[in-house]
Amino acid sequence: MRPYRSLSLVVALLFYSAVLFAQQTTHAPIDSLLKQGVTLNDAGKFAEAVAKYDEVLKTEPNNMTAMYEKGFSLSIAGKNDEAIPCFEKVIASRQIANAYVALANIYDNRNDFVQAEKYYQQGIAAFPNYGSLWFNLGLSYMRQKKYSQAEAAAIESIKLNPKHVASYQVYGYATYFQGKSAMALMGISNFLMFNPSPQQARVGATIVRQITNGVPNSGTDPLAKIQQETIAKAVGAATTGKANLKAVDSVSLQLTSAFKAIKEQSGQYSSPFFEKFFGDFFGAMANSNYMDVFAHVITVSLSPQENLAWLKSHIDDAKAFNVWLSAQKRQKE
């Protein structure tokens, strides 16, 4: 999880930098220096970027945009000890939510999880609707193998930003490592719909195949056995007596049956969020005409040529599936 985590943080930080320029009004010379700093940072010239931010801070010592950007450049350059005071000053101002993420990330990467969680939680208290805090907290819990906490954090991230792809990845893997096969199956399937990178897609699609093939991850959660048995029965009923099926056709049949069975029992899983957000959605999909398209989409990474050729030859079905997806109104509770 760590490599993806670092990448997601960089993307989040870069995005937030752009947002800041749109939100803060500065004098023209200051604005120019800040833009120059960002350009230099993006070019990998971190020392030069820091120099630009220092010019701003000489004139405006309380310019938190410059302070944040300085900390960001120092952190990317590997000078985290120098970056920490910058982020601490920004946090004290309570102006920039991502400063909490950046500071917590430094401690997280040092395996100082106590400090990391402290800053994530402080950030959440100050900016409860900032999804990146919940997402990165979930990643931190994943690294610590605190899977139930990671699941809870991922749920909050999804509620705040249902289009955040990696939150589904965290949710799917967190539930998988607890043995919650039904939740993992739907969470990872949702992740795969967003067309993640080939490597991440292969891992996710492989887990989906393991779950449907009756090789779920063991877990200690009391709901794990119920979920595993539900899927096993559904999958068995879907493929019994059907020989010589192509792998993707088998996936389509298995998932259709599994989604329907999970939807019928989702109320037993002690998670209103799962019941509404995932159970209702995938239950509806299982009763639609798009399961074949869906199966080819989520298994592209396992058989690229075959699946892409099929999707190309069924382009109208794929377009109709996208229209159907756009029309779905998913409830969070």
Image (spheres, helix red, strand yellow):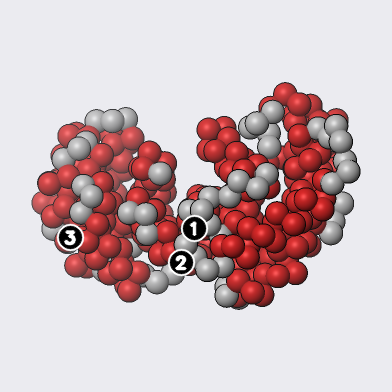
The residue that disc 3 covers is: 88
| Image coordinates for residue 131, horizontal then vertical, percent | 44, 62
Kindly identify the amino acid type of the residue bearing the numbered disc 3.
Glu
Assess whether mark 1 and mark 3 are in contact (beta carbons under 8 angstroms).
no
| Image coordinates for residue 327, horizontal then vertical, percent | 76, 60
Q: Residue furthest top?
A: 305
The residue that disc 1 covers is: 219
Gap in angstroms between the C-alphas marked 2 and 1: 17 Å
Tell me the number on the disc at residue 296. Answer: none
Judged left or right of residue 98, residue 237 is right
Q: Who comes first in sequence, dot 3 or dot 1?
A: 3
Gap in angstroms between the C-alphas marked 3 and 1: 39 Å
Judged left or right of residue 276, residue 154 is left
Q: Residues within 10 Å of mark 1 (few under 14, many from 20)?
A: some
Compared with 195, 27 (above or below) is below
Judged left or right of residue 134, residue 207 is right
Residue at 35% of width from left, 50% of height from top? Answer: 143
* Residue 4 can be seen, yes or no: yes
Q: Residues within 10 Å of mark 3 (few under 14, many from 20)?
A: some
Secondary structure at badge 1 equals loop
Secondary structure at badge 3 equals helix
Of circles 2 and 1, the one toward us is 1
Compared with 33, 257 (above or below) is below
Judged left or right of residue 311, residue 116 is left
